[in-house]
Image (cartoon, helix red, strand yellow):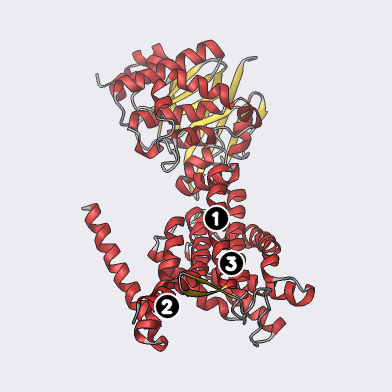
């Protein structure tokens, strides 16, 4: 195995990992603020993909150009979902498991609805850059994946600026760090929650739109990415956005390097073995730090 | 009656089915400092949380500057001039001191006057100016209490409620904060409710005081009266 092959695998891994990072960050930001583990994050990504598909097939829009529209639609959808449904299951004194059942149920509802509307066939869109490749230091790279990766970087930077500079962004951080403190400062939890969930849905939607440029959509595609998103946030510590970002990239590289080492049929096995090892090592390190 | 700022009548609070506050009535005039004292778990924090809109009373009335406020949100109380500095400070540990102070500016007025408020705060506590860019979680307990007090003052309150400001702090830091509060009350007409377990210290600063026992106000009067009250002496002052 020469260096070039490994390098190519790492580059591919980063490209795939970019999508994982996005969905991981969207899951982690919702948890950080609302302490809710959102079980329909993968399905939100799937909705983003269908959204892109419709914009492309009905209006002939390039999937990359559709991203801002998908983001806005998914943001509004997330805000509605939070303020109409989820908020009712996270009131004080409610059983904590209520919201888990609710979000898991919503996930099933979303994928079944898409199955009713679009059927179970795989659907794909043609981007302007389809089949084009560039070469970076000897590694061939599809333009679609490269652009997706650049969008990930841009979105992460934007997310940080938003949380650091804007008033609502600061309120989101404040709420995630101390709920009591936030309420004595007059921060309206409802508004912050709606905005956070909307943001989480929008990021998942953008991840879906990016994915759509080189992958296909079907009603259950969300479950694959949903599971991945949980691995990502566990690697990167739940609630930690930077952790989510790098967790996704690590997972992507694990997959492609795994395929290289043990053939692609067993790459999943390797991914999960590595995941378990990471968990154990992380746990040990944390225990050591505490001691 | 003209300068009565907060008037609470027959306040009742329940947590679920369990009633914790029974028929409490008290008031604060403009520029006045009152102390609410009592031992742990008697309902002091619950009482003042209700006065800041954090929990909703199940009975009674809370009038702020003549307006009935019972049942309103914390945000409405802030707009009406009531700000709480909560027990245990409740800062945002991963945000800088400056950001913490900025989060205190909720109302439009407070946001418009942010710069002046910051200057004031830094004049009271020069230490905070040096630490403005530091994360609040990295400060000492005393410095954190300064930030919590200042964050409350950024709101430009007309009634500041301080819940257990002395908890776990060195006496000189507490004295400093109390002295500053007292001078603001005298110079600018700020009303203050001081919730304290340190009864002697609280009554030295306050004009009047209320003693809460098991969710009821049992003794009230001027600070001097309370300090000389045989019951208070026996139960709280230790002689």
Are there few (<14), some (14-19), or many (20+) residues within 10 Å of tag 1?
A: few
Could you say which is closer to the camera, residue B94 or residue B152?
B94
Report x, y in % for residue A133: 57, 75
Q: In this view, does A88 lie above or below A260?
A: above
Element assignment for label 2: helix
Q: What mark, if any, has residue A91 been given in the picture?
A: 1
Q: In which quarter of the image is residue B38?
A: top left
Q: Quadrant of the C terminus of chain B?
A: top left
Report x, y in % for residue A176: 48, 49
The residue beneath circle 2 is A256
Mark 1 or 2, nearer chain start: 1
Could you say which is closer to the camera, residue B174 or residue B66?
B174
- The span from disc 3 to disc 1 (Cα, nearest Å) is 41 Å
Tag 3 and tag 1 share a subunit:
yes
The residue beneath circle 3 is A147
- The span from disc 2 to disc 3 (Cα, nearest Å) is 19 Å
């Amino acid at each position: 195995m020469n260096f070039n092959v490994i390098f190519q695998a790492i580059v591919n891994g980063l490209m795939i990992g970019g999508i994982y990072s996005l969905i991981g960050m969207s899951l982690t930001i919702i948890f950080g603020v609302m302490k809710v583990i959102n079980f329909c994050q993968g399905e939100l990504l799937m909705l983003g993909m269908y959204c892109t598909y419709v914009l492309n097939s009905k209006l002939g829009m390039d999937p990359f150009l559709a991203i801002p529209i998908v983001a806005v639609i998914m943001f509004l959808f997330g805000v509605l979902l939070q303020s109409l449904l989820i908020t009712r299951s996270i009131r004080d004194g409610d059983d904590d498991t209520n919201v888990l059942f609710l979000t898991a149920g919503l996930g099933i509802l979303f994928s079944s609805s898409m199955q009713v509307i679009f059927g179970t066939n795989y659907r794909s869109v043609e981007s302007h850059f389809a089949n084009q490749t560039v070469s970076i230091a000897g590694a061939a790279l599809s333009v679609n994946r490269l652009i997706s990766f650049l969008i990930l970087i841009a979105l992460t930077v934007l997310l940080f600026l938003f949380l650091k500079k804007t008033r609502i962004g600061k309120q989101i951080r404040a709420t995630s760090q101390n709920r009591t403190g936030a309420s004595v400062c007059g921060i309206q939890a409802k508004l912050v929650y709606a905005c956070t969930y909307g943001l989480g849905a929008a990021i998942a939607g953008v991840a879906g739109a990016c994915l759509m440029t080189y992958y296909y959509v079907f009603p259950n595609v969300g479950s694959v990415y949903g599971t991945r998103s949980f691995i990502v946030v566990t690697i990167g510590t739940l609630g930690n956005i930077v952790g989510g970002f790098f967790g996704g990239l690590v997972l992507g590289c694990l997959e492609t390097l795994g395929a290289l080492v043990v053939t692609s049929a067993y790459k999943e096995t390797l991914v999960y073995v590595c995941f378990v090892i990471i968990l154990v090592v992380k746990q040990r390190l944390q225990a050591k730090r505490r001691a | 009656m003209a300068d009565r700022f907060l008037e609470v009548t027959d306040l009742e609070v329940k947590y679920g089915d369990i009633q914790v506050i029974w028929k409490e009535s008290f008031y604060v005039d403009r520029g006045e400092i009152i102390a609410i004292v009592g031992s742990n778990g008697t309902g002091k924090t619950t009482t003042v949380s209700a006065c800041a809109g954090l929990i909703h009373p199940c009975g009674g009335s809370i009038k702020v500057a003549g307006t009935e406020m019972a049942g309103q949100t914390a945000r409405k109380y802030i707009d009406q001039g009531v700000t709480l500095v909560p027990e245990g400070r409740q800062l945002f540990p991963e945000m800088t001191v400056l950001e913490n102070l900025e989060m205190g500016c909720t109302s439009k007025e407070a946001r418009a006057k942010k710069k002046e408020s910051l200057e004031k705060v830094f004049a009271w506590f020069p230490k905070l100016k040096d630490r403005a860019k530091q994360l609040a979680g990295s400060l000492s307990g005393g410095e954190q209490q300064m930030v919590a007090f200042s964050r409350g003052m950024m709101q430009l309150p007309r009634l500041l409620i301080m819940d257990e400001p002395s908890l776990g702090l060195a006496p000189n830091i507490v004295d400093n904060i109390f002295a500053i509060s007292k001078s603001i009350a005298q110079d600018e007409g700020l009303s203050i409710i001081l919730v304290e377990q340190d009864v002697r210290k609280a009554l030295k600063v306050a004009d009047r005081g209320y003693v809460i026992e098991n969710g009821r106000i049992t003794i009230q009067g001027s600070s001097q009266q309370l300090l000389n009250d045989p019951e208070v002496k026996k139960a709280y002052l230790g002689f």
